[in-house]
């Protein structure tokens, strides 16, 4: 717990740095005023809006204002929707989490059995098939896979809805689309991690005890092989929260990635800042959780 | 009662490698009698560890027994089903390994690893297995056994881990314990403790022990009978007294001469010239001839049989 709190404190400078970087990037990508006013607006009108929004203040002053608002939980207002930017982002979170969670489940269901199997049957035809499949899964662009899934499973056979967010059925295709790429990476990782562990002395000990091979592989080996896999899972989960734009677009999934890209295009500063801030917090959190999981999985790791 | 508990006849083991099959055990014959301690001695690469893994049925995936007989307590191990073999392993035949640092699973507690065998073979409940586990740890001289049950391997010293390994191996009262260099990785003082422990445990139970070692000190300490292996073959077999008093094979003599003696002052330690031949490139005739001080043309040509020179004493050499 002490470790957790210490690390939570360490994230404060990281978050501060992120706000600074995003703040600057948003301001170098162009003037939002020109997009907010109609093309017929006069220079005076533009100038007065700029003045009203505080864009004429020196950058340090602007950043300081932004930070002090942030501390009070005020992320500013969206130019586009004229509502609280943070509320807008929060509204998208459930959809994003739902998809991220479902994709991770898909990835886990696919990769764990395949990874173990391909390690146990190494260099067999099955192993070749699985590792080949993993390369394919990684190389396949997600938008293409998404479109193919829609074509075969939604349009032609009408098993699943084409797009949008609703019940469980709506979740299946986008989750498979996102989960496949992650599954491919995780399968390869589990395979190599299992191969390394299966050659260890304690596996021979486990066999010499007369345990069933399934127990040797799935318990003695897998518990050890899981340790590096957890890192990748945590990193993947955090990318799932921020970086699923393509899949969200293909399936018209109302998630955070879609909102963020729209906001970037419209130079909707407050929304961009609020969304990146939240994604950053999530990335940090999932890394912390990975750290804590290590401790559960590997008793040799000590923090203190 | 079967007098010969483990009977190995003409055992041959080979490994599949990229260059085809490589045979590392080439017709090994020996037996382990009820209640006796048999030592298998030889340099690294002489096939002694492979022989023990073959007997346990846990050769690596690329290894196989391709000829010979292995009979344990009247059961033919080569035709035993996987399930029956499993029922034997860790139960009637158990094994301790050379490296106590890596032989225990790092992510499970000592308690889990000792209970596991008992639950599998004796169908004990967790509570029963726990009680028995603590008893076993106490038997092998681990202080605070109850606390140690909750510890992880990395929290124990090498000597303690080897004691844990012995406790696990003995927990199901095996009839045969195979110990593959159980003291090699330990400090000298700990070695002595582990050897004493093994001897005491043997006196209490009727377990036969097959100890694999390259340390003739260990042999003298523990063994009743010794077989000396070289390049995948038995080159000499004798009772421990006979072997130390009257070694026949030049290789055995070489091993004996390699032991430094306290009263002799010498500048150089004796060593047998050369190294164990590579299994992919075995010499013709007697496999020891390139390193043998007695070798002549005959030795290059004739591969000698194992011959008895007296009751229970056999050697594989035409020169002595």
Image (spheres, coloured by chain):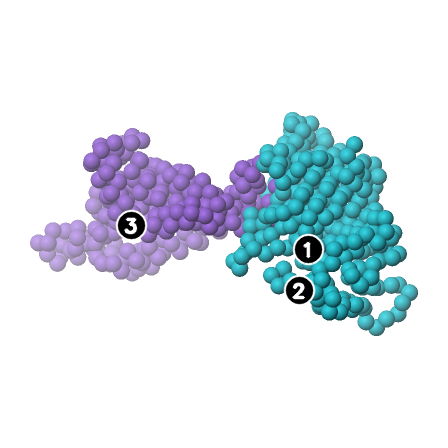
Q: Residue furthest right?
A: B263
Measuring from the top left, give residue A36's x and y in whole percent.
Answer: 17, 50
Residue topped by disc 3: A141
- Select label 3 or label 2 by which is in front: 2
Q: Is residue A46 left or right of residue B92?
A: left
Measuring from the top left, give residue B290's x and y in whole percent.
Answer: 71, 68
- Select label 3 or label 1 by which is in front: 1
Measuring from the top left, give residue A96's x and y in whole percent.
Answer: 33, 40
Q: Chain B: what color? A: cyan
Residue topped by disc 1: B232
Chain letter for mark 2, please.
B
* In the rendered image, the vertical position of residue A130 relative to residue B187, given as above or below: above
Task: Residue B165: tell me if it is visible.
Answer: no
Chain letter for mark 1, please.
B
Measuring from the top left, give residue B104's x and y in whole percent.
Answer: 65, 45
**Local crowd size for mark 2, using a 10 Å CA cut-off: few (<14), some (14–19), many (≥20):** some
Q: In this figure, what is the number of numbered marks?
A: 3
Badge number at residue B207: none
Residue in view at x 87 percent, y 57 percent: B246
Chain letter for mark 3, please.
A
| Element marked by disc 3 | loop
Residue in view at x 55 percent, y 53 percent: B16
Q: Chain A: what color? A: purple
Quarter of the figure with residue B24: bottom right
| Element marked by disc 2 | loop
Badge number at residue B283: 2
Q: Nearer the viewer, residue A60 or A79?
A: A79
Q: Distance between the Cα atoms at labels 1 and 2?
A: 12 Å
Q: Nearer the viewer, residue B136 or A94?
A: B136
């Amino acid at each position: 717990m002490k470790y957790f709190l210490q690390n939570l404190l360490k994230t404060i400078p990281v978050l501060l740095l992120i706000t600074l970087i995003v703040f600057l990037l948003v301001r170098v990508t162009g003037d939002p005023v020109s997009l907010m006013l109609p093309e017929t607006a006069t220079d005076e009108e533009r100038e007065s809006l700029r003045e009203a929004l505080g864009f004429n203040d020196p950058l340090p002053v602007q950043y300081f204002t932004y930070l002090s608002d942030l501390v009070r939980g005020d992320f500013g207002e969206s130019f586009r929707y004229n509502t609280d930017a943070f509320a807008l982002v929060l509204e998208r979170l459930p959809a994003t989490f739902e998809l991220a969670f479902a994709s991770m489940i898909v990835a886990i269901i696919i990769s764990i059995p395949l990874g173990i199997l391909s390690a146990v049957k190494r260099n067999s035809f099955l192993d070749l098939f699985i590792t080949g499949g993993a390369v394919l899964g990684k190389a396949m662009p997600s938008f293409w896979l998404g479109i193919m899934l829609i074509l075969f499973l939604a349009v032609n056979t009408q098993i699943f809805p084409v797009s949008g967010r609703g019940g469980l059925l709506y979740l299946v295709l986008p989750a498979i689309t996102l989960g496949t790429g992650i599954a491919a990476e995780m399968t390869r990782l589990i395979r190599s991690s299992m191969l390394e562990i299966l050659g260890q002395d304690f596996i021979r000990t486990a066999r010499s005890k007369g345990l069933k091979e399934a127990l040797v592989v799935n318990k003695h080996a897998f518990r050890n092989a899981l340790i590096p896999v957890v890192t990748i899972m945590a990193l993947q989960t955090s990318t799932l929260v921020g970086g699923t734009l393509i899949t969200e677009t293909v399936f018209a999934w109302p998630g955070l990635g879609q909102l963020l890209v729209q906001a970037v295009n419209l130079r909707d500063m407050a929304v961009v800042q609020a969304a990146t801030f939240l994604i950053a917090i999530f990335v940090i959190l999932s890394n912390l959780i990975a750290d804590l999981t290590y401790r559960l999985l590997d008793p040799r790791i000590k923090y203190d | 009662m079967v007098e010969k508990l483990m009977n190995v006849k003409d055992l041959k083991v080979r490994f599949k490698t990229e260059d085809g099959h490589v045979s590392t055990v080439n017709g090994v014959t020996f037996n382990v009698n009820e209640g006796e301690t048999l030592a298998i001695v030889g340099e690294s690469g002489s096939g002694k560890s492979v022989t023990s893994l073959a007997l346990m049925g846990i050769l690596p995936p690329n290894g196989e027994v391709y000829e010979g007989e292995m009979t344990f307590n009247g059961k033919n191990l080569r035709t035993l089903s996987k399930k029956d073999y499993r029922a034997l392993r860790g139960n009637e035949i158990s094994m301790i390994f050379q490296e106590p640092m890596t032989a225990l699973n790092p992510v499970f507690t000592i308690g889990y690893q000792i209970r596991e065998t008992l639950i599998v073979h004796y169908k004990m409940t967790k509570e029963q297995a726990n009680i028995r586990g603590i008893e076993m740890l106490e038997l092998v001289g681990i202080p605070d056994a109850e606390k140690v049950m909750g510890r992880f391997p990395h929290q124990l010293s090498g000597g303690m881990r080897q004691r844990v390994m012995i406790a696990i191996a003995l927990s199901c009262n095996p009839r045969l314990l195979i110990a593959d260099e159980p003291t090699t990785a330990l400090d000298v003082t700990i070695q002595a403790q582990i050897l004493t422990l093994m001897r005491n445990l043997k006196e209490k139970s009727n377990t036969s022990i097959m100890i694999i070692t390259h340390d003739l000190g260990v042999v003298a300490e523990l063994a009743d009978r010794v077989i000396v292996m070289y390049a995948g073959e038995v080159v000499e077999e004798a009772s421990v007294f006979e072997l130390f008093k009257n070694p026949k094979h030049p290789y055995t003599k070489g091993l004996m001469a390699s032991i430094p003696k306290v009263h002799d002052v010498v500048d150089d330690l004796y060593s047998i010239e050369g190294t164990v031949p590579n299994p992919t490139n075995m010499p013709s005739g007697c496999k020891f001839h390139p390193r043998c001080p007695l070798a002549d043309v005959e030795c290059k040509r004739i591969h000698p049989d194992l011959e008895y020179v007296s009751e229970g004493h056999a050697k594989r050499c035409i020169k002595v």
